[in-house]
Image: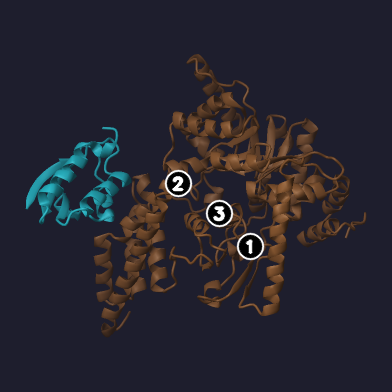
Chain colours: A brown, B cyan
């Protein structure tokens, strides 16, 4: 409770914060409209909530009754969130997130910690957390780097930062308190170190390194047409993880051999709903055309209540273990069938593969196959031009799927290992939670064992096995994956040339020898130390 | 002051998107605009208010408009309901 003589001051604080919030949103909408209609429409719904006259009045009344500005905002929005959560209409329940964003923005403005998108061109953003669409703004504002308090290395913000080649250090506790406005800082995205107010010597050494990196990157361009082969001529297939036809074009420009992963759920965000088969067909065909005859691997909608909530019947306490991936697709066969139809039609125009996410049982695979088969039959009857032999693969991203890899390998045309989720589920570690960020590591011996099992199973049966998680783009992991026998990697287009460079430096036989030791490791530290020895080229045959 | 009624015509009812359209249109006018259901006056410029209405297809709502531009506002809101917010009727 605040004292009566503070009431007017609190109301003033709230009005000021409210004005900052709506003004920021207005500016953000203005600048987003030309770039992304989706981002603009999300921001518009935030603005509508933030400028709701009924909510604003009610907050002021709460302050008059003795609440602080912060408490009044939180309490008022809680009432509406509770109402929305209990709503029968699931579209209404999905609005809860919008309300949460607005509350965060007003609270940030009250704390005077600005979430402003009005950035100077030469600045680094230091924030509590960053949403994907904020990241889009930072990219356009030519922000130099990003530091956040919340999020792990594989959080969406971090993945986007990597895609945009934006130096980022995520999960620095109290960063917004330790770093002041106008402080000179160094953001070392390679090692995850942030240096605040560096001395001259440190600054000079970092400037020299940055210059070296830029020379290196230019020299990588010479690798575009070079084969992705190891120094002992083991040829790898290097593909791209993409979200759009524009990405596919970039991927081709940097020499990627098609797409190892197309995240089709990106389209849902763009449309704001499930697109019709015709709309999907156009989107898929556009990507297939950009691929110029190379392989395009569409992953079926990998939705879950943390990513895209439409169609999920109610709020989930634990979305990572909830109705997601193939589980959702089998729960909504109507949505799945429409996607299958569009992919089958687009496949006529190129080399298309189709991949099922979050598989954890053979029954799921069989149920999905029945739906695909049924769709093929009905399209054939209608005389629609489709391919009848679409290669079907599964993502190996649950421990269950890895343990049953042999069974799956016998039933599919290819498998792809999703290392992020495989590590998250094997280590029981939320990969977006900075409190356990140090436990999340795909180099954990248990994860490495599961990857090795999957590769062995695929090789035994003779089907392609690829890795399309963040691990594929991880510097220390290249040798490990080559040594395990992986010959197909898929990474963000921005990482492709660096990865190709590392592949060309590697010796597959030395990698295979090192992996024998890695598989005997009992700790993550040991795995890293073997890989480090290998990278520095002095790996012996004994276990460390 | 103008008083009349409107009917929710689109199949999905007054869900999020139509609710946002109502607010957007209402906010363009200086007049006070209220939707009336079961004796409750809901401010049509309040997104949370309009969403709370949870008006389903076929539902009849009172419309209460008062202000300098009330006739323009009335025409705009009535038109929005009549066309079913551009959705399936």
Which residue is identified by label 2?
A309
Category of crowding for the residue at label 1, using alpha-carbon neighbours closer than 10 angstroms: few (below 14), some (14–19), many (at least 20): some
Instruction: Identify the residue shown where x is 42% and y is 43%.
Output: A272
| Number of numbered callouts drawn | 3
Q: Nearer the viewer, residue A59 or A22?
A: A22
Which tag, 1 or 2, sits closer to the chain's start? 2
Q: Residue at x 16, y 57 (%)?
A: B30
Crowd band around label 2 with a 10 angstrom C-alpha radius: few (<14), some (14–19), many (20+): some
Residue highlighted by disc 1? A437
Question: Which of these two is toward me, A16 or A388?
Answer: A16
Point 53% across, 25% down: residue: A345
For mark 3, give the secondary structure: helix
Q: Chain of mark 3?
A: A
Q: Is residue A483 left or right of residue A295?
A: right
Q: CA distance from mark 3 to mark 2?
A: 16 Å
How far across and how far down the image is residue A119, in percent?
47, 65
Q: Please report, as a chain letter, where disc 2 is located.
A: A
Q: CA distance from mark 1 to mark 2?
A: 25 Å
In this view, the mark in front (3 or 2): 3
Q: Which residue lies under the disc numbered 3?
A: A156
Report x, y in % for residue A212: 72, 62
| Kind of element beneath mark 1 | loop
- Disc 1: which chain? A
Q: Are marks 1 and 2 in contact (CB under 8 Å)?
A: no
B45 up-or-down from A417: above or below: below
Contact (CB < 8 A) between labels 1 and 3? no
Taking the image as shown, residue A451 lies to the left or right of residue A340, namely right
């Amino acid at each position: 409770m605040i004292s009566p003589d503070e009431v007017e001051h609190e109301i003033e604080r709230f009005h000021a914060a409210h004005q900052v919030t709506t003004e920021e949103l207005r500016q953000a909408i203005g600048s987003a409209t030309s770039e992304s209609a989706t981002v603009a429409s999300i921001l518009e719904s935030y603005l509508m909530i933030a400028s709701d006259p009924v909510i604003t009045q009610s907050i002021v009344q709460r302050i008059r009754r003795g609440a602080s500005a912060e408490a009044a905002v939180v309490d008022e929005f809680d009432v509406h969130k509770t109402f929305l959560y209990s709503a029968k209409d699931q579209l209404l329940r999905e609005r809860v997130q919008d309300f949460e964003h607005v509350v965060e923005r007003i609270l940030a403005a009250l704390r005077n910690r600005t979430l402003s998108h009005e950035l100077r061109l030469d600045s680094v953003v230091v924030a509590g957390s960053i949403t994907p669409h904020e990241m889009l703004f930072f990219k356009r504002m030519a922000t130099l780097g990003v530091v956040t308090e919340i999020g792990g290395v594989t959080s969406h913000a971090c993945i986007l930062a990597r895609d945009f080649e934006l130096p980022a250090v995520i999960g620095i506790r109290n960063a917004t308190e330790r770093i002041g406005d106008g402080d000179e800082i160094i953001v070392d995205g390679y090692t995850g170190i942030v240096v605040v107010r560096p001395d001259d010597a440190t600054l000079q050494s970092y400037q020299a390194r940055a210059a070296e990196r830029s020379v290196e990157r230019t020299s990588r361009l010479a690798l575009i047409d070079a084969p992705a082969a190891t120094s002992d001529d083991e040829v790898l297939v290097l593909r791209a993880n993409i979200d759009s036809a524009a990405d596919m074009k970039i991927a081709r420009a940097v020499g990627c051999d098609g797409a190892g992963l197309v995240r089709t759920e990106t389209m849902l965000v763009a449309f704001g709903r499930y697109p019709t088969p015709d709309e999907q067909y156009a989107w898929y065909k556009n990507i297939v055309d950009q691929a110029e005859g190379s392989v395009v691997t569409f992953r079926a909608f990998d939705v879950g209540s943390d990513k895209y909530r439409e169609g999920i019947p109610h709020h989930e306490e634990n979305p990572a273990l909830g109705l997601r991936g193939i589980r959702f697709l089998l729960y909504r066969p109507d949505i799945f069938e429409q996607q299958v139809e569009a992919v089958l039609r687009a496949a006529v125009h190129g080399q298309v593969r189709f991949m099922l996410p979050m598989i954890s049982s053979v029954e799921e695979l069989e149920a999905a196959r029945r739906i695909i088969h049924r769709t093929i039959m009905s399209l054939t009857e209608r005389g629609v031009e489709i391919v009848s032999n679409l290669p079907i693969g599964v993502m190996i991203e649950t421990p269950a799927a890895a343990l049953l890899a042999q069974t799956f390998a016998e039933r599919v045309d290819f498998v792809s290992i999703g290392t992020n989720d495989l590590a998250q589920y094997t280590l029981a570690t939320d990969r977006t939670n900075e409190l356990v960020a140090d436990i999340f590591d795909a180099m954990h011996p248990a994860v490495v064992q599961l990857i090795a099992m999957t590769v062995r199973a695929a090789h035994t049966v003779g089907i392609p096995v690829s890795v399309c998680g963040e691990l594929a783009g991880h510097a220390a992991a290249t040798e490990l994956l080559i040594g395990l026998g992986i010959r197909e990697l898929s990474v963000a287009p921005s990482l492709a040339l660096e990865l190709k460079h590392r592949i060309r430096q590697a010796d597959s036989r030395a990698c295979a020898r090192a992996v024998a030791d890695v598989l005997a490791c009992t700790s993550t530290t040991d795995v890293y130390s073997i890989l480090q020895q290998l990278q520095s080229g002095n790996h012996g045959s004994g276990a460390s | 002051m103008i008083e009349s009624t409107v009917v929710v015509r689109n199949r999905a009812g007054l869900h999020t998107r139509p609710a946002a359209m109502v607010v957007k249109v209402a906010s363009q006018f200086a007049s006070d605009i209220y939707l009336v259901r079961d004796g409750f006056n809901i401010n049509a410029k309040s997104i949370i208010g309009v969403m709370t209405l949870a008006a389903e297809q076929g539902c009849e709502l009172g419309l209460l408009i008062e202000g300098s531009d009330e006739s323009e506002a009335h025409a705009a809101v009535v038109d929005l309901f009549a066309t079913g917010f551009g959705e399936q009727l």
